[in-house]
Structure formats: structure tokens, C-alpha cells
Image: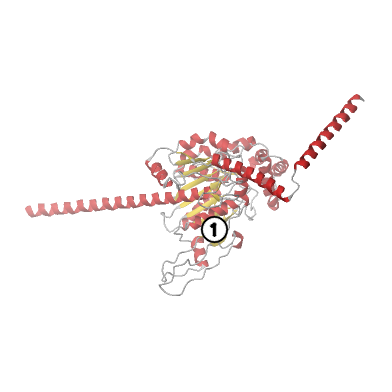
Amino acid sequence: NVTTASMRNLSRRLSRNLSRRRSSIVESLPDSPQGWVTLVTTAASAVLAYELRLQKSLTSPPNVFCQDTPYNTRLRQILSTPADRGILSRKIQPSLLVGTRGRLASIAAYAVPHWNEDGLNMDDCSSHHLPTSDDGADSTPTSSSTKLLFREVMHMGSDGAEIAIDWEVPPEPITSSHDPYRSPNQRRNDVLRGPISRPVVIILHGINNDASFGYIRSLMKACTDRGWIAAGFNFRGCGGVPLKTPRGYTGSFTGDLRTVVNNVVGRMVNEHVPLFVVGNSLGANLITKYLGEEGRCGTLPPNVAGGISLGNPLQIHSGNMGFPWAQILGMGVKKMIMLNWNVFRHITSADHRRAIKEALLAPTIGQIDCALAPYMIRNNPEYPFEVRVGYEDGEAYWDDASSYKYVPFVSVPLLKVTAQDDFLVSGPSLRKMSHCMENPNVFVVKTKCGGHLGWQEAPPDTGNAFGFGTSWADTATTEFIATVIKLRNEKRVKDEESVAKSRRTTEDQLLDAMEDAKKIRSML
């Protein structure tokens, strides 16, 4: 057979060529320890030089887009001062090897745990105490205790679901020896029952995650380091709390977030204590939709002072997601179904059981959404936001879930941050950015690097240039919150002064009228 003979000859020639090349490579390798040191050093130098060039090309300040209003001008001025350290003016320098690559930066943000300074994690659900000084007034003031970590399970009145809130409460500073010591139970009860007198930051995670992931724990620590109370919001069926109903979380249902916000606001000492909502990825879409729904209806609680949206796609359409992300996210949803199988196996509806089976057999997140859409929990976007069940199909679900339709109605300052190299949401987010520009309350920040929720940074003054850096998003979020609180307090002081001045003017006018009346009576 001529074809078989030619194939054998080709195989022999390729084998001889590979053998010769292998021999030449082996002969070119060093034959002494010094030679190996030289080779490794040269290769490492080449890699480092490439990384440094890549880091330099990615190092740049973020791009900022917003309407030109007095409030935004003031906000941007504060966040850009001083020029070399302002979060909007200084350059973002990604860490070498990890921060310079979007996917590695994202993996680092998801996987690397960020514990507090005492090495505790949320599973401890306990508090440890620092020793306090008993030496009298001359002793150095210390904190009364370390950060307090505990979990609260909230009951959702809409359908009986349970939501886990992981609280992290900062230490209470002692300014003098006369300050009373507050036990962990007292501090816990202040959060669970009120009154809450510190700012509260509620943080939502992304799809197939929970509040124990690295990027959530890191941001919670950054908030408590500022003296604010942080709350890690676990979606229904996440964080180790099983589903109570056969309806998991979705990208459109804001009822659980609304219930949690209203419960926390009800515990606050007054309407001047601010509350912020921070969302990551799918959570960013949810907080934007929530703020838009409440803003359009004028029902947003007065304590809600602002929001931060990190990695928000704005437009959700899982059917357009490509390989391998559609398959990876789909496996996460199927894992959630299997973990809560005790609930799903008791479904009596044959159609619903068939939909669950189709979802488990579907290879992509888009096909899973289409199978489960008729049985998803959702809410009316108009007040009183009543709970409903089911969409006509996946397209109807994706249309309702897309937050770009709600962002023009957000009534409080909203910071939206996206990275140009975000491999999941950069495209749809950029296509729908014009809807953000319609709203003077929306502040859009676009970074050159960061991946999806990564933003692994290596600031020059930290000395940590390689690997896992600090999170630029944590710094941007806390700086934005601090600035909004400052401007909010300034406005409240001005309003109070204006009311007091108006009251004094009214009193003066009344006194003048009384004096005039006396003069008229004396003349008569």
C-alpha cells in the first residue's frame, strides 16, 4: 500500500528530526552548577524585565465619568486630593505576576482569605478581648475589645426563606478611663436589636459565592478598620444556610435585600446614621436594581446614603455567555441545587420537577436559566414590590434582571467600578454605560487593569510588588463611603443652620410686630 508506506516514511523522518533536536537541546544545557545558576538567573531576569514592562504599561490612573454638577465636582475634588494619593488621581500599579493578569487577579480576589488582625474567621462566631489598662488616667487609651464576629439568620416574610448575615463589628475605642466597658453580648445586642449608632455597610457577593470569599472578607475588614459595621449578605441557599423553599436566589429578585435593609434601618438610632449597600458582580446588579426601584417610587429609606457597584454587567443575558464561563457558572448553579436537594425532591408539581431535571442536565448557565425561569421568584418593580413567581422564558428573566433599566432612577450617590480587562462583564457594561450617564448621582470609574473583582495592587510605598497585593477596590470603596458621609454631614449642618436662622428671623419678626402693636396702643 503506497499510502501506508509514505506515512511510515514520514513518521520515521519526524522521529529522526525530533531526536536530533532533542540531542541539540540536551547538549546546549549547562553541565555544571555554575552554568545552571547562570541559566536560571538569565531566565528569571528576562521574565522580570517582561513583567516590569507589562506593569508599567498597565499603571495608570482610573478614568472617571460623571455629570458636571456641584456635588460631583466637590466629590471628585475630595477623592482626587492629594494628587499623588487621591483614589481618583493616583496611578493604579498592579502587582507583578498576579495583578498584571486579569484572570490571576480575579482568582486571587476569590481564593485568598483576608482574616482580621487576630487571625479569626467568620466561622469562629466569637470574640476575643484585649487586656485593658487599670493604671488610671495616665494609661494609654486602648480599644475595649477586638472585632466582634457573629452570624444572624433573618427570616424573609415574603416566602419563609432564611438569609444569613455575617456581622463584623469594630472595636469600641476608649478615650478615657471613665468610659464604660461594654461586653460582647452588649455590643452584639446593639446590632441585633438596636440602637445602632455607627455607619453600616451591607456587602453582597457574586454568583455561586458566599460571604466567606476573600474579596468579601477583605472589604469587610477595610470597613471595620474605619470604625463602621460591616455585614456580609449571603444569598438564599448560600453560606451554609439551606433553602426553606424550592426557590433560590436570582439576578432580579431584590425582595431579600429590601427586607434586610429595612430591618437594619429599623434598628438605627435615627435617620442620620448612614447605611451603604455594596455589590460585587451579580450582587452589584442587585443593589443597582434595588436602588433604582426604590428611587423611582420615592420609597428609599432615608438612612440609605449611597451604593457601590463593583463589576456590574448592567445587562444580563446568560444565553450569550461563551465557553468556558457559561459551563463553569452552570456547574455552580447545579451544585447549589444538589446541596439543597432535600427541598427540591419534595416538589409536587410534575412540570417543576421536569424543569429541575432539565436544569441539572443543561450544560450552560443560559440553558439552566431558561429551564428554571417559569419557577423563579421575582418582585414587582413598583411599590409595594409584591412577590411573584415565574417568567415566560429566559429572555423575560434576563430583561427584568438587567439593572441598566433602573440605574437612571438611583436617587443617592452610586459608585460604579469596572476594569477594562474584566473578561466577564466589561463588554455589556460598556455597551450600557450611557444609561449611567443619564443620572447625575452615578459616578462611573473605569480602571485599566483589575480583571473581575481582582484589582490586586502594589502601591510603591508598600514594598509588596509581587504576587497577592492589596485591593484597590477596597480603598476606593471606603474612600467613597467616607466622602459621602462627610458631604452628607456638611449638608445636614447647613440645613440645621438654615432652619435655625429661619426660626430666628420668624421670632424677630414676631417681636417687631409685638413692639409695633405696643406703640400703636400707647398712641391710642
Relative placement, left or right, of 119 versus 352 is left
Residue 197: quarter of image: bottom left
For the point 57% across and 36% down, which residue is it? 428
| Residue 192, percent from left and from top | 51, 61
Please name whichever residue, 217 or 246, is drawn nearer the observer in this view of the structure: 217
Question: In the picture shown, does residue 349 fall above or below 504?
Answer: above
Residue 386 visible? The answer is no
Please name whichever residue, 113 or 409, is drawn nearer the observer in this view of the structure: 113
For the point 47% across and 72% down, which residue is it? 133
For the point 41% across and 69% down, which residue is it? 176
Residue 46 visible? The answer is yes
Relative placement, left or right, of 168 versus 345 is left
Q: Amino acid at mark 1?
A: Trp
| Residue 167, percent from left and from top | 54, 58
Residue that badge 1 annotates: 167
Residue furthest to the bottom in view is 135
Q: Which quarter of the image is occupied by the N terminus?
A: top right
| Residue 390, percent from left and from top | 61, 41
Please name whichever residue, 149 or 159, is drawn nearer the observer in this view of the structure: 149
Please name whichever residue, 291 or 227, is drawn nearer the observer in this view of the structure: 227
